[in-house]
Amino acid sequence: MVIFPSLQAQALEAAPYSYLEKLAEALENPNVPDEDRDLIDTAVFGRSVQLALDPEGRVILPEHLLTYAGITENISFVGTRNTFHLWDPVLFEQHDKAKREIARANNISLSTILAKAKSLAKGA
């Protein structure tokens, strides 16, 4: 596993090394804009750290990454599709609340997402 600062939030993102290999392969596509490639090279590959275990088998998180995410004592682990995020619990609650407010304001639900995806697939 590797860990790096999230591009979208004050959190850390962790992924299997194989996911970063897929990302690196995608960046080889000549249609990827140079500025996107540079962003990912700098912010993800340049800041990623392979997770290490201590003698008891616990994960050791680098201090500079903990500082970036505002993590001091407790950590919230939040799974996503291909990665997982590590958050300060208070910051995550604020983030989650804001996202849910956006969903309510825009009438976004699982059924609307599925219907939209189905509609887009038919049009493709």
Image (cartoon, rainbow, N blue to C red):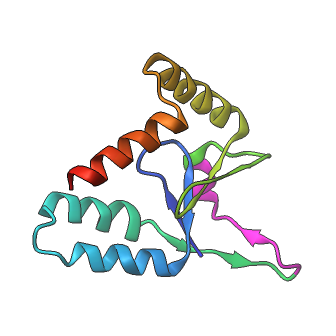
Which x, y percent locates residue 40?
31, 63
53 sits left or right of 13 in the view: right
Which of the 4 image quadrants contains residue 95? Answer: top right
> Considering depth in this image, is 47 or 97 the residue closer to the camera?
97
Q: Which residues are magenta?
A: 56-67
Which x, y percent locates residue 9?
48, 42
| Residue at 24% over, 73% down | 27
| Residue at 50% over, 26% down | 103
Spot the residue most to the right: 56
Q: Where does the N terminus fall, quadrant-wise? A: bottom right
> Considering depth in this image, is 51 or 81 the residue closer to the camera?
81
> Considering depth in this image, is 33 or 102 the residue closer to the camera?
102
Question: Is 57 a magenta residue?
Answer: yes
Which x, y percent locates residue 124?
21, 56
Spot the residue most to the front: 122
Which x, y percent locates residue 50?
57, 77
In the picture shown, does residue 34 fall above or below 53?
A: above
Residue 63 makes an appearance in the image: yes
Residue 46 makes an appearance in the image: no
In the picture shown, does residue 18 fall above or below 93?
A: below
71 sits left or right of 5 in the view: right
**Label total for image:** 0
39 sits left or right of 69 in the view: left
| Residue at 62% over, 42% down | 70
| Residue at 57% over, 57% down | 64
Question: Is 83 a magenta residue?
Answer: no
